[in-house]
Amino acid sequence: MKLVRQKGAQSGLTLLELILACSILLILSTAALPTLKYTVIRSKEYELRRDLREMRNAIDHYKDLADRNLVRVQVGSEGYPPDLDTLVQGVQYGAGGQQKIRFLRRIPVDPMTGQTEWNLQSVQDDPDSNSWGGSNVFDVHSKSQGTALDGTKYSEW
């Protein structure tokens, strides 16, 4: 059996069908936007936690080697690195000082601010202080004043 097309008949969508399809797509995409927004924020928060953990582990490793007298430290620094650049550039390691050890490949970029600048805290600083005394690095925090999804400030992490 053969189907015969009528002359002048065209296949395609009518204007009403096109408007209906676009409306359905618009409704579905609007429902997905909040989910996408929170997914991006969660990934940045995960990256911030990972970067902070990486830097704090590097500081702890430096402190451990300093306590075992395997790296030279400044008097009064309590065995903590003088700054984050020292962790990247490395220090002389061992009794002879022939080897060089690096603790970080690079200073991570803060995902919340987009910069490699961090709030640093030294042993001599007041625990609630936001300014760094400049003598050593005991801890590191984000400079972002934003609030996380759990309600805490990024600068308190």
Image: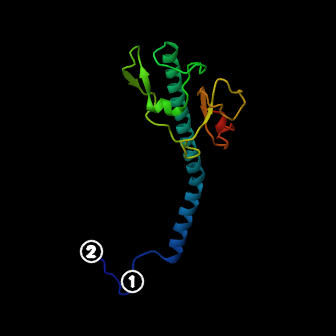
**Front in this rendered view, residue 14 or 142:** 142
Residue located beneath label 2 in the image: 1
**Front in this rendered view, residue 152 or 61:** 61
Whether residue 102 sits left or right of residue 55 in the image: it is left
Quarter holding the C terminus?
A: top right
Identity, as a three-letter code, of the amino acid under mark 2: Met
Quarter holding the N terminus?
A: bottom left
Question: In the image, what residue occupies the spot 36% across and 20% down?
Answer: 98
Question: In the image, what residue occupies the spot 52% across and 30% down?
Answer: 55
Question: In the image, what residue occupies the spot 49% across and 21% down?
Answer: 61
**Front in this rendered view, residue 47 or 68:** 68
Label 2: state its secondary structure: loop
Residue located beneath label 1 in the image: 9
Residue 57: x percent and y percent? 51, 25
Place residue 10 in its image quadrant: bottom left
Cα separation, mark 1 vs mark 2, equals: 20 Å
**Front in this rendered view, residue 104 or 156:** 104
Residue 42: x percent and y percent? 57, 41
Residue 152: x percent and y percent? 68, 36
Between disc 1 and disc 2, the foreground one is 1
Identity, as a three-letter code, of the amino acid under mark 1: Ala
